């Protein structure tokens, strides 16, 4: 393990305050340098941007709408007064059902332009695997997706989707058999095939330049949401709320609001079975500073620095790490990080389904579980009704088996086992 650049007072490439950097095997340093150069010589060009934006418009279906959630707003307000206007940024309407495709298309297009002949990825919920398999099919590149065997079992529909799209799904049996272990194996694969292979990381985590690259591709969410909020209500929102796994949908929607001092930013992590039980994935709330998957950030670990297993009902949040930019936003106070339990997320899925007719992903539901608290807090502080933008990161179809088993245990067809 070696660090190729050191943190300092001045902004250093790859660092967010003291977080980020590049803590990787020496064999990966040339590949990361090549990728960092490609950001400047390829991604930054007008030709690349035009091609990627064209795909976002005509393949993904962007811009996604910013819709008002009036019945949900009434439901979260027990007093019946108008506490908040809620606006939903509908990434569930993206092709493949979540925000992941914005990043996957950007990175796989980059892989093609870099002359790579093979793409690998890791996946938790399967959404990033599906997005990467989709982009690889579109560009005619072979794709292998590492996935914890626990996630292979609980996200069967997405495994089938990846295979239909022509990708090879590689189950990972080590450790907790979830996202962290899949990422370890993907990094190992990359070390041995670094010449030919592009590693498409699915969140704003990993060694420099990945957190920056992924955030750049996901910032389209916040750029659209900011302009749409201004158009819809003539003002910026008072708050933005998003769920946090590795942190890509949240950083994508936060970034364009960072210099708007009047906009409070809230990330919501998975509290799993409850913080007190120790079975959770609240990395920013409960973790310590450490190194995981090539970057320095908050990590769930024990006194000896051993990385702990994370627990969440949502596979996409079941990760003991978090992107370094969120660690910096927590420490410098620009964003606040809350958590929601499995049960609160399930209740939020049911509430949003019945009030808005939208079946959200279990990951996304964590943001909805805290939106009432955020609205009450800000309304009390500002002494007026507030407006809140919620990052609706994805749709819940992939979670149907879990949702039926937990929310409708008597009526789930075929037992509904998750
Ligand atoms: C993967 C996923 C997440 C968590 O990943 P982030 O990188 O934190 O955004 C959240 N919501 C959905 C729908 C996902 O598929």
Image (cartoon, helix red, strand yellow):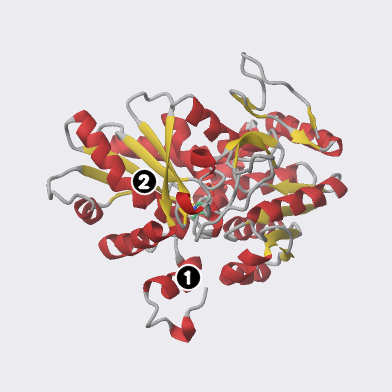
* Between 42 and 25, the one nearer to me in the picture: 25
In what quadrant of the picture does the N terminus appear? top right
Q: Which mark is residue 402?
A: 1
Q: Residue at x 45, y 31 (%)?
A: 256
Cα distance between the residues tagged 1 and 2: 23 Å
Q: Residue at x 23, y 51 (%)?
A: 76
Q: How many numbered discs?
A: 2
Q: Residue at x 62, y 71 (%)?
A: 153
The mark nearer the N terminus, 1 or 2, is 2
For mark 2, give the secondary structure: strand
> Which numbered mark, 1 or 2, is in the foreground of this view?
1
What percent of the width, then of the height, locates residue 368? Answer: 35, 51
How would you rate the neighbour count of disc 2 (Cα within 10 Å): few for under 14, some for 14-19, many for 20 or more?
many
For mark 1, give the secondary structure: helix
Q: Which mark is residue 4?
A: none
What percent of the width, then of the height, locates residue 135? Answer: 64, 55
Q: Which mark is residue 390?
A: 2
Q: Is mark 2 within 8 Å of ligand 1?
A: no
Q: In the rendered image of this protein, does residue 224 appear above or below residue 4?
A: below
* Between 88 and 375, the one nearer to me in the picture: 375
What percent of the width, then of the height, locates residue 179? Answer: 64, 55
């Amino acid at each position: 393990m070696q660090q190729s650049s050191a943190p300092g007072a001045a902004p250093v490439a790859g660092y967010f305050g003291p977080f980020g950097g590049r803590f990787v095997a020496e064999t990966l340093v040339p590949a990361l340098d090549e990728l960092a150069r490609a950001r400047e010589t390829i991604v930054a060009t007008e030709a690349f941007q035009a091609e990627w934006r064209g795909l976002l418009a005509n393949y993904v279906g962007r811009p996604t709408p910013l819709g008002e959630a009036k019945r949900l707003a009434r439901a979260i307000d027990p007093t019946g007064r108008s506490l908040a206007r809620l606006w939903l940024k509908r990434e569930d309407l993206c092709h493949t059902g979540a925000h992941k495709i914005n990043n996957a298309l950007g990175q796989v297009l980059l892989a093609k332009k870099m002359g790579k002949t093979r793409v690998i990825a890791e996946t938790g919920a399967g959404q990033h695997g599906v997005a990467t398999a989709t982009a690889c099919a579109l560009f005619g590149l072979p794709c292998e997706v590492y996935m914890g065997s626990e996630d292979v079992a609980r996200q069967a529909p997405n495994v089938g989707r990846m295979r239909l799209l022509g990708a090879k799904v590689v189950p990972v049996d080590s450790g907790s058999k979830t996202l962290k272990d899949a990422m370890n194996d993907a990094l190992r694969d990359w070390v041995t095939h670094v010449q030919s292979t592009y590693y498409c990381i699915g969140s704003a985590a990993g060694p420099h330049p990945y957190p920056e690259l992924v955030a750049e591709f996901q910032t389209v969410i916040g750029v659209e949401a900011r302009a749409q909020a201004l158009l819809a209500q003539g003002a910026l929102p008072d708050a933005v709320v998003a769920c946090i796994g590795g942190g890509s949908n949240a950083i994508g929607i936060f970034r364009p609001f960072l210099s708007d001092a009047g906009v409070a930013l809230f990330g919501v992590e998975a509290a799993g079975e409850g913080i007190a039980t120790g079975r959770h994935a609240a990395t920013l709330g409960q973790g310590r500073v450490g190194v995981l998957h090539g970057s320095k950030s908050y990590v769930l670990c024990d006194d000896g620095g051993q990385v702990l297993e994370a627990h969440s009902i949502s596979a996409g949040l079941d990760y003991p790490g978090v992107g370094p930019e969120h660690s910096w936003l927590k420490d410098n106070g620009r964003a606040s990080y809350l958590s929601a339990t499995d049960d609160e997320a399930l209740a939020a899925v049911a509430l949003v389904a019945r009030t808005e007719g939208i079946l959200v992903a279990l990951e996304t539901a964590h943001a909805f579980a805290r939106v009432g608290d955020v609205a009450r807090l800000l309304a009390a502080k500002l002494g007026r009704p507030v407006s809140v933008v919620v990052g609706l990161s994805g749709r819940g179809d992939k979670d149907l088996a879990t949702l039926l088993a937990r929310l409708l245990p008597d009526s789930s067809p075929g037992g509904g086992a998750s």
